[in-house]
Image (spheres, grey):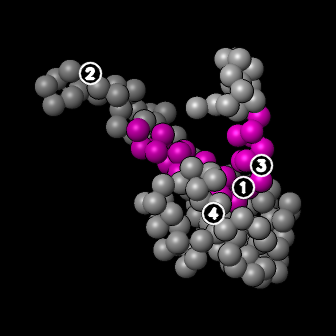
Amino acid sequence: MHSDDNIPALVGLNTDDQAWIDELTGSPPGNSEPEGDPSLPDDLGERGQRLWNAFTESNPNFGQGEIELLVEACRLVDRLTTLEAELESLPLTVKGSRGQPVPQPLLSEIRAERGLLAKLIEALNPKKSRSEAGRQNALQRRRTGRRNPA
């Protein structure tokens, strides 16, 4: 499906992320043959189903690796929904080990989950990610007046 064999590097995945994705899918994303129309997993919540439908309607011929990444992204969206709902009933700060106020630990978990979701979505949309990166580089060059971003 994708012509570029090094998609993870293009979207900023480090080697730990890539190892996790390879283990999850059995191969790097984009290197498998199309499997036809993927069916919606039974265990997805409302937000996970919306994400699934958005991706499968735009590309019904994902390969098996992409399907597995998409399933994980959809489950992650559902998990984020649960964590965010839990956070609503909790204080944003808690007492630290010395009694000082510290951020609610759930905040960092949500931030980490969102970061992983962004990486999974970028892995499923490599062309969009590259074009967005190009727009950001052009904007940075205009702001700084530099031709080659460093």
Which residue position holds label 2? Answer: 101
Foreground disc of the pair 2, 4: 4
Q: Say which amino acid is labelled 2.
A: Pro
Residue at the image point whose x is 63% and y is 63% from the top: 6
Task: From the viewer's perspective, tell me whether residue 36 is left or right of residue 144.
Answer: right
Q: Are marks 2 and 4 in contact (CB under 8 Å)?
A: no
Task: From the viewer's perspective, tell me whether residue 69 is left or right of residue 51.
Answer: left
Foreground disc of the pair 1, 2: 1
Quadrant of res 131: top right
Q: Residue 128, labelled with which disc?
A: 3
Q: Are marks 3 and 1 in contact (CB under 8 Å)?
A: yes
Instruction: State the CA–CA distance, disc 3 to disc 1.
Output: 5 Å
Which residue position holds label 4? Answer: 6
Q: Say which amino acid is labelled 3.
A: Lys
Q: Residue furthest left?
A: 98
Which residue position holds label 1? Answer: 126
Instruction: State the CA–CA distance, disc 3 to disc 4.
Output: 15 Å
Q: Residues within 10 Å of mark 1 (few under 14, many from 20)?
A: some
Where residue 54 appears, as percent x and y from the top left, is 80, 56
Q: Is residue 4 above or below residue 119?
A: below
Dot 2: what SS? strand
Q: Say which amino acid is labelled 4.
A: Asn
Dot 4: what SS? loop
Q: Residue furthest front?
A: 147
Q: Is residue 30 visible?
A: yes
Q: Residues within 10 Å of mark 3 (few under 14, many from 20)?
A: few
Q: Residue 147, labelled with which disc?
A: none
Dot 1: what SS? helix
Foreground disc of the pair 3, 4: 4
Instruction: State the CA–CA distance, disc 1 to disc 2.
Output: 41 Å
Dot 3: what SS? helix
Residue at the image point whose x is 78% and y is 60% from the top: 55
